[in-house]
Image (cartoon, helix red, strand yellow):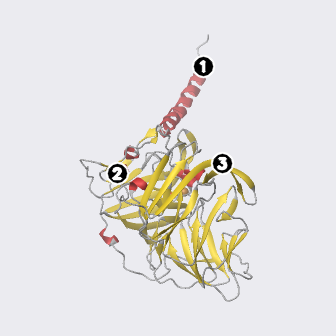
Amino acid sequence: MRPPRRGVLIAIAATLVVLAPLAFFWQRSLVPNDLSAMSMGYADHGGGPAEHAHHGIDVSTLKAPSGPADVSVDLTARKEKFDIPARGPMDGYTLNHTSPGPQIVAKQGDLVQVTLHNESVPEGITLHWHGVDVPAAEDGVAGVTQDAVGVGKSFVYRFVAKDAGTYWYHSHQVSHEQVKKGLYGVLIVQPTPADVIAAVHTYDKVRTVNGGYGERRVEAPGSTVRVRLINTDNGPMAAWVDGAPYKVVAVDGTEVSSPPEVRDKSVLVTAGGRIDVQVTMPQGSAVRIGLGGGPTTLVIGAGNAPTGTQPRDQVDLLTYGVPKALPFDPAKATRVFQYNIGRRIGFFDGKPGLWWTINGHQYPNVPMFVVTEGDVVRMTIKNTSGQVHPMHLHGHHVVVLSRNGVKATGSPWWTDSLNVEDNETYEVAFVADNPGIWMDHCHNLPHAAQGLITHLMYTGVTTNFHLGGGPDNQPE
Ligand code: C2O
Ligand code: CU
């Protein structure tokens, strides 16, 4: 055979020059199928000490107090068909044969106990108490705080409902599939009488409220009504009231200080977020709660309800309400972190595409934000990724200090689900007062599954659970 021509050799060399780095980046992007949250990426100490605790506390020991439960609930998860209104049967997941699952109502201070059974969800399940600052062992993150609960198995969650407010729960195993297809429910911690729940969920492109489609009518439970808006979807939703002025009385489970009355404005409910609005019922007519536009609305009271369209203006929580002293001083921060969300072309787990980055790194090579109990933490979340991200930190509430450099001047804006638009920068602060290993991720769950996830980790807390591994833990 003739030796190859020079031109052919050059072509082969050129191909190698292109392919070798591609192969390298492809190989490097593979997510190991058994990974510890503890050895993920690199530690970012936020300017604080890089202590190494000599003895670790296992996350599974960070539990609620023992003793009898005040509220006790059994939930059985199944993979089964159920009817979505206006569409027909859908293959999804239920809890006690319904989706949403049963509403759990507790009084502030109650010890809540939920026993979760997996009857037939092959991938396994967990429950996460979104917005409730539970002890770490009860947080329900597969592979971080527990193993996914396999078919035929059970898991008991216990926590004290110490903060009154509007919350929800959902699976945190293969959550981008399981939540969308029904594994979620509402959790209310009273005391707020006279309330109406508006839990919004989109099943297969059908937007529902409390599992119903179209105009849903409920009785007014009083002359002043608190409407608890819960967004269980992946994107933000504007909500508003037609037929009466209203006040935004709570955000993500925290009361707003001196909320003024608004009219002709909508309020944004972040994906995963909750907004409570208070409406004074008009004499002799009903009010309509607009939920993102479209046919599904909630009508409260008897009589006619006006049909409105989405107001142009929006309540801005940065300036809404009246300031109030914070329980800590953000100026005395002991850790300062940057959470920069970007996007770049590359491989993720061997797949080419446009993938999210955190501080320039792709999952799982992302920062691990390390704190010590008692730290005052400031974090700047900056989004230049081209899309909106509803950022959710587990186990804590953060207070917004500024947006795009403009200081917050309204009521303290406490949040657990923050809508960070493209080209926005939020500075938030919190106290590290709940030891554990906590996910800090985007609540557009497909984004989380594409690697928009990091963890907040307390010095000395360890986990023996693994992502992947035997129970195939896949929290996203
Ligand atoms: Cu509602 Cu980590 O989630
Ligand atoms: Cu996102």
Give percent across and percent down for residue 376.
32, 65
- Residue furthest to the top: 1
Give percent across and percent down for residue 337.
37, 60
Q: Circle 1 sits on which residue? A: 5
Earlier residue among tags 3 and 1: 1
Specify whether 399 is left or right of 175.
left
Q: Amino acid at mark 3?
A: Glu
Q: Circle 2 sits on which residue? A: 61
Could you tell me how far apart the alpha carbons at marks 3 and 2 are, in whole angstroms?
Answer: 34 Å
Which quadrant of the rendered structure holds the N terminus?
Answer: top right
Q: Disc 2 vs disc 1: which is toward the camera?
A: 2
Earlier residue among tags 2 and 1: 1
Q: Is residue 436 above or below residue 301?
A: above
- Residue furthest to the front: 68
The label on residue 80 is 3
The image quarter in which residue 234 lies? bottom right
| Location of ligand 2 given as a quarter of the image | bottom right
